[in-house]
Image (spheres, helix red, strand yellow):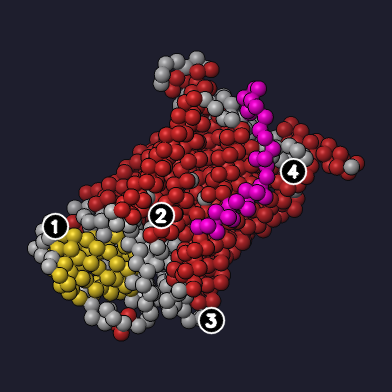
Amino acid sequence: MHRSEKVWLTLSFGMIMAFMIFAGYQTFALEMGPPSHGERIDPQKVDETAPFNEPGVKQIGENEYEVVMTLQIFSFTPSDIEIPAGSTVHFTLTSKDVVHGFQVAETNINAMVMPGYVQKITQKFDKAGEYLVLCNEYCGAGHQLMGTTITVK
Amino acid sequence: MESVIAQNTNTSLKEKTNKVLGVNLQDAKLSKSYLSVAFIALLIGATLGLLQGLNRAGLLELPAWLNYYQVLTAHGLLLVVVFSATFTIGYFYAGMSHTLGGLLPKVRTMAWIGFWLKIIGVVLVVIPILMNEASVMYTFYPPMAAHPVFYFGLVLVVLGVWMACFGGFIQVANWRKNHKGQHLPIFSFFATGVFILLVGGTAFVAVEVIFMIIPWSLGWVDTINVMVARTLFWAFGHTAVNIWYLTAVSAWYVIVPKIIGGNRWSDVLTRVVVIALVIMNITGGFHHQIVDPGISLSVKYMHVFMSLAIGFPSLMTAYALFAVFEKTARKKGGKGLIGWFKTLPWGDVRFLAPFIAMAAFIPAGAGGIAQTTNQLNQVVHNSLWVVGHFHLTLGMSVAMTFFGISYWLVPHLSKRVLTKGMNQFGVVTTIIWTIGMITMSGAMHTVGLFGSPRRTSYSTYFDNATALSWDPYLIFLAIGGTMLMVAAIMQVYSVFNLMFFAPKGETEFPIAEEEKGASKTPYWTERWGVWVVLMIIVVAMAYVIPLTDFIVNAPPGSPPFKTW
C-alpha cells in the first residue's frame, strides 16, 4: 500500500469519526437529537385521547407555549397559529390517518408524524414573521395543499 | 476423479470456444432482452420525469386522468426498480457467461423465467397506477393502501429477481466446483456480491408485502403495524439503490481500466471493497428514519455509524480509481502534477460517461454523508435536496455508468461494432445528460435547503411568500428535465442502433488484467459463507432492537386508507 493511500484512508477514517463525534456531541451533550418521542396512541381514537381531544395553543410558561396538533388529510389542527416573538414552542403531534411530515420552512423543524405515535419537537422563534408550515410526506391527492402558517409577532 | 477431469477439460474447452467464437448467442439473447426492457423503461421513465419537472416548475397542469402522483409513482418504480434491476441482471449475466465459460442451460432457463415473472409483475404494477388505484409512490407506506393487484405485481417482480439471483448462485457454485482453489474471476465476484445483496435486501420488502400488506389490503386483517412496515421497507429501499451503485462500481474497477489501456487496481483491495459493501449495506437504509417517532436516540446514533461505515469502502474506491487513471496516463507519457489528466481518452464515450459518473459521486457521496448525520438529516429530510441527491447518485453515477457500458456491451452481444459516428453521438448524449442533471440536481439541492418539499405537485401554499420565493429555482427543474429527456431519447436510440443496425463485427468484453507481478490474493476472500453470516450479524445488530420494540410495544394498528 502506498504512503499516499495510507494517508488518504486515515483521513477518510478520521472524517467518518469526526462526523460520529459531532453527531454524538450534538445529540447527547447539546440535546439537539432528532425528534424521537416514543409515546404510542390509538390512531383511530385520537379525538378521544388526551391531549389531542383538545388541540390548540396553550401558554405553559413565560414565553413558553405548547401546541397540541393533529395532522389529517390535508390539514393541520390548529392552523394559522400566532405566537409572540422570543417564545419557545413545544409541538406535540400525531396523525389521524396516514403518514404525514411536519416541516416549518426556515427553521430546523422537520419530523415524521406517524399514526399510532406521538411525536414531539421544540423550537424557539426569535425572528418575527410568517413561517410556512407544510406536510413534507406525500399523503394523498391534496398533499400539495396541506400547509398553514405560524405568525411570530 | 475422472469425471472431474472430464468436466474440467469440458469447461476450459467451453471457455476457449467462447474466446474464439465470441459471445454465446443464447446467452446474448437473454442479456439483450434484459437490456431492451431496461432502456424502454428508461425512455418511459424519463418522459414521466419531464412531465413532473414541467409541472413542478408551474408550466404544465397535468390532466385529472394522469395526475402528478400517478406520474411520480410510475417514474420512481420504472427507474429505481425496472431500469436498474433489468440492466444489472442483463449486464452481470453477460459477464458471467463471458468469464465463467457460458451459462449452464438450467441457469439460462431460470433467468428467462425470472425475466417473464418481472415483465408480468411490472404490468400488474402499472395497471392499477394508470387506473389511479395505486398512487402510493415507490415507498407505498402503509396505511395508504393501493389496489391489491399492485402488491401482487411487486411480489412477482421480486420473485423474478430471485430467479435471476439464484441462477447466478448456481452458475458460480458450478464454476467453483470445477475450479477448486481458484479465485472467482473478479467480474463474477462482483456479480455474486450484487446477487447476495439483491436477495438480502428484497427479503425485507417481501416479508412486508406478503405477510403484512397483502392480507391487510385484501381485508383479511383489519389493521397494520405502520412502523414495522416502514422499517422493513427501508431495509430494502436503500439497499436497492446501493446495489445499483455497486453494479456501477464493478465497471469502474473491472472495465474502465481496460478501456483506457491500463491494469486493474489491487485485486485483494477490490475484493475487500465488495465484501465490505455486502456486509454493511442493508443497515444503511435506517437513515431514512432519522426523524421518525418511536426510535430512541441511542438506536439512531448507532445507525449513524452503520450508515457512515458504507462511506469507507467508497472512499477506498475513490483513491483506487484515480490511482489507476494516473498510473495509466503516466505510462502513456502523461506528465506533471495534474497534466497527465489530458492523456486520458476523453473522446471515447466508453470512458467519458463512466468518468463523469465517478466524478459525480464525489459531491453525491458527500451529500450522502451529510444526510446520514442526525442533525444535518433533520435539515434536509423530505425536501427536494434529497431528490437532488439521488439524481446525482442514481441519475449520474449509476445511470451514466450504465450508459457507458451500453456502448460496448450491446455491440458485443449483437456482434456489431461501435462506429466513430455513434461514439461521437454518445459523447454528445453524455454532455447533454451531464448538463441537464447538474442543472436539475443543483436547483433541487438549493431549493431543498430553503425547505421546498419533495413529492409535492406545484403549489404556492395559498400564495405564501416563502413558497413563491422557490419558483425561480423550480424553473431549472423543467430546463434540466427537458435536456435529460433529449439525452434519454438519444441514449435509447444508440442502444437499439447498436443492437440492430450498427455494422457487423466483433466487439470485445473489456476486462482489465491485474498488473504483472501483483501479489497473489489470499484465498480467504472467497469465503462467501463467512461474509453472508457477517452480513446477517450486522443486520441483526441494526434491526433486532427497533423491530422488537415496534412489535412488542405496538400501538393499535391502522386500517387502510385511499387518500388520492
Q: Crowding at label 4, few (<14), some or many (≥20) Cα neighbours within 10 Å?
A: some
Q: Main secondary structure of the magenta part?
A: helix
Which element type, helix, strand or loop, lies under badge 4? Answer: helix
Q: Are marks 2 and 1 on the same chain?
A: no
- The span picked out in magenta is B513-542
Can residue B80 be seen here? no
Find out whether residue B483 is within the magenta segment. no
Give the residue pinned by disc 4.
Answer: B176
A23 lies left or right of B312: left
Which element type, helix, strand or loop, lies under badge 1? Answer: loop
Which of pointers 2 and 3 lies earlier in the amino acid sequence? Answer: 3
Q: Which label number is shown at residue B220?
A: 3
Amino acid type, mark 3? Trp
- Chain for mark 3? B
Which element type, helix, strand or loop, lies under badge 2? Answer: helix
- Chain for mark 2? B
Q: Which label number is shown at residue B301?
A: 2
In x, y percent, where is residue B228?
Answer: 48, 68
- Residue drawn at (49%, 29%) of the image: A5
Amino acid type, mark 1? Asp
Spatial separation of the CA atoms under disc 3 and disc 1: 51 Å
Which element type, helix, strand or loop, lies under badge 3? Answer: loop
B99 lies left or right of B436: right
**B287 in relation to A68, above or below:** above
Which of pointers 4 and 2 lies earlier in the amino acid sequence? Answer: 4
- Residue drawn at (27%, 64%) of the image: A121
Find out whether residue B536 is within the magenta segment. yes
